[in-house]
């Protein structure tokens, strides 16, 4: 059985594409029921729509500062799509405990560092500044503390002497595309 998933994005959506491409495989245990964005011109939305994947936008701006009202609108879209599992893929809003509790155990995220190293933003720059030899990405369950939930799977890349933020980000991103479908397969309920 294919589990219906919703993928939440804010921009480019390359991890969403990697998940959608994996889901197109007959033996992959998920299908994309919805690509949902908080930004109406997110590039990933157009890519999904062109492929016949259902898409929706809920703009956080429309809710002023009321984060829970925004999230209740997200939840309505997710529920209407039939999705029972949520993958955050470059979704640039911090979620409240209400949303996180609603999707407890069914909500995962990809983060571009080897957590617990470098939670938060600008991970590649910070990895270079810290002069680490190894960097990477992590898929983890989402809990109320940002970038701190149980780790599902990680992938690492070497940091090379002449790396810039961009070259390192590109090397990590290739691993993200491989990692996220594998980690989702692991995280889905069995059966
Ligand atoms: C990725 O690096 C992801 O790990 C982070 O945000 C970026 C999103 O890129 N959370 P994309 O939109 O999936 O291309």
Image (cartoon, helix red, strand yellow):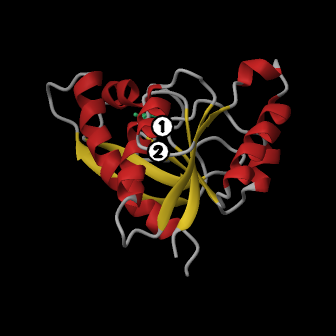
Quadrant location, the C terminus = bottom right
Residue 111, position in %: x, y?
Answer: 47, 42
Instruction: Name the residue rendered at 51%, 70% in the picture.
Output: 2
Query: For numbered disc 1, what is the local secondary structure?
Result: helix
**Labelled pair 2, 1 in contact (Cβ < 8 Å):** yes
Camera-side residue of 128 and 74: 74
Question: Is disc 1 surrounded by few (<14), some (14 to 19) or many (20+) residues within 10 Å?
Answer: some
Query: For numbered disc 2, what is the local secondary structure?
Result: loop
Residue 152, position in %: x, y?
Answer: 49, 62
The correct choice, above or below, for 102 with respect to 40 in the image is below
Q: Is mark 1 within 8 Å of ligand 1?
A: no
Residue 35, position in %: x, y?
Answer: 55, 42
Camera-side residue of 137 and 52: 52
The correct choice, above or below, for 19 with respect to 173 in the image is below
Would you say 141 lies left or right of 110 here? Answer: right
Instruction: Name the residue rendered at 27%, 43% in the picture.
Output: 174
Q: Is mark 2 within 8 Å of ligand 1?
A: no
Camera-side residue of 71 and 160: 71
Instruction: Name the residue rendered at 41%, 43% in the picture.
Output: 51
Camera-side residue of 48 and 150: 48
Would you say 63 lies left or right of 30 here? Answer: right
Question: Is disc 2 surrounded by few (<14), some (14 to 19) or many (20+) residues within 10 Å?
Answer: few
Residue assigned mark 1? 49
Q: Quadrant of ligand 1?
A: top left
Residue assigned mark 2? 52
How many angstroms separate mark 2 from mark 1 (CA)? Answer: 5 Å
Would you say 87 lies left or right of 136 here? Answer: right
């Amino acid at each position: 059985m294919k589990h219906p998933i919703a993928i939440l994005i804010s921009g480019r959506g390359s991890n969403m594409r990697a998940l959608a491409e994996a889901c197109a495989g007959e033996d992959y245990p998920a299908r994309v029921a919805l690509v949902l964005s908080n930004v109406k011109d997110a590039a990933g939305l157009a890519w999904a729509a062109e492929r016949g994947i259902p898409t929706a936008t809920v703009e956080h701006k429309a809710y002023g500062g009321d984060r829970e009202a925004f999230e209740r609108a997200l939840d309505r879209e997710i529920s209407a799509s039939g999705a029972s599992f949520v993958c955050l893929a470059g979704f640039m809003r911090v979620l409240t405990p209400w949303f996180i509790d609603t999707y407890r155990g069914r909500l995962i995220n990809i983060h571009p560092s080897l957590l617990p190293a470098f939670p938060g933003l600008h991970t590649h720059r910070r990895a270079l500044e810290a002069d680490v030899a190894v960097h990477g990405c992590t898929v983890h369950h989402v809990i109320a503390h940002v970038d701190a939930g149980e780790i599902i799977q990680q992938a690492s890349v070497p940091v090379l002497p002449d790396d810039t933020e961009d070259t390192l980000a590109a090397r990590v991103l290739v691993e993200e595309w491989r990692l996220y479908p594998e980690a989702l397969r692991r995280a889905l309920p069995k059966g």
